[in-house]
Amino acid sequence: MDCSRIIRPRGRRRRGSLYVMVLSTSILVMTIGLSALIAIRVERRESETTANVAQARFAAQSIVEVALTRMGNNPNWRTTYTHKVWTGKETYGDADVMFLLFDQVDVDLANDPTHAVRVFGKATVGKTVRVYSVLVDASSTQGTNLLKNADMESGTTAWTTAAVPGGGLLTSVKDITRTGPAIVLSSGRPTFLSGVGQDITASVTNGATYYTEVWVQSKVDDNLIGVVMVLDTSFGPQSVNFDVAHWGQDWYKVSGTLTPSWTGTLKAAYWHVAIKNGISDFGIDDALLTEGSGPGAVELTPVPGTWRREPAM
């Protein structure tokens, strides 16, 4: 027997291999665990992002609908809101929302009631922002207008001074317009009651209430603008009117209600406007006379096919 041969124990080699195997397995398990944890976090973030996108999309479209409702219930929405200016932020659930109105023709919502308007709605949920818009045709937001050539675009057609005898001169003027290419100017007025009007005999009903509005521009600062229904009946002349005071030479919208009533037979009826504290010239534009006590609530319907997503703004 060769005693010089060294016999090494096999136990240490086995224990070392087992240690390496356990360590490798632990690292593998830890790696799998971390990967699963990361995957869960990524999935959770993706899920939250998907939820935020859905919520922001729904909220942006909803605030557009809210804007349409508010516009429909507010006859003065064109002056309440300003072109291309976001409203104040509101919070619905997790979404911060606001809306703006964009005049499709120019930068002024109030200068023409026939201009189409695009309504934008924006919603922010976390870091997600969504903007949607829709086009609204706002040209038919009033009741039937009983006045002809109410926008004055056909010159002096249908307009008259006949409500007051010797009522002066009417001309179509194009250099001081409020909207469109022309207005009707009343000049050479012999009395403070002289002005401009229109024959409404065929449209007026005894005892009915009428809402009316008209834009007026005077050549002097101090104005008392009168809107009147002049009635010629078999019992003699009768009238119903309202007056509005205004300071300045800028365009001014006069509005109110008239409820004509008479006895006997109605021979003729006129809707008439005058400046009652002088005989200065004045112009009128965009007149309205409609049955009812006011312009009332209107339903603004989106134009089909105009809903679209917009870039964040």
Image (tube, rainbow, N blue to C red):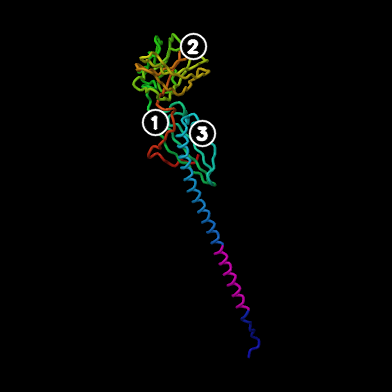
Specify the quadrant of the image occupied by residue 183.
top left
Residue mark closest to the camera, 1 vs 3: 1
Task: Name the quarter where the N terminus is drawn.
Answer: bottom right
At 40% from the left edge and 33% from the top edge, which residue is drawn?
Answer: 137
Mark 3 vs mark 2, foreground winner is: 2
What amino acid does circle 1 point to? Answer: Ser
- Residue 134 in picture, x, y percent from top left: 43, 38
Q: Label 2 crowding class (10 Å Cα cut-off): few <14, some 14-19, many 20+?
A: some
Determine whether label 3 and label 2 are within 8 Å by CB: no
- For label 3, the SS is loop
12 shown above or below 289? below
The amino acid at mark 3 is Val
Circle 3 residue = 85
* Closest to the observer, 24 or 214: 214
| x and y percentages locating residue 118 in the rendered image | 44, 35
Residue 175: in sight, yes or no? Answer: no
Q: Earlier in the sequence, mark 1 or mark 2?
A: 1
Separation (CA) of disc 3 from disc 2: 40 Å
Pointer 3 local density, CA inside 10 Å: few below 14, some 14–19, many at least 20: few
State the SS at label 1.
Answer: loop
Label 1 close to label 3 by CB (< 8 Å): no
Above or below, 274 against 313 in this view is above
Question: Label 2: which residue?
Answer: 278
Q: Which mark is residue 77?
A: none
Crowding at label 1, few (<14), some or many (≥20) Cα neighbours within 10 Å?
few
| Distance from the alpha carbon under mark 1 to that under mark 3 | 24 Å
Q: Secondary structure at mark 2?
A: loop
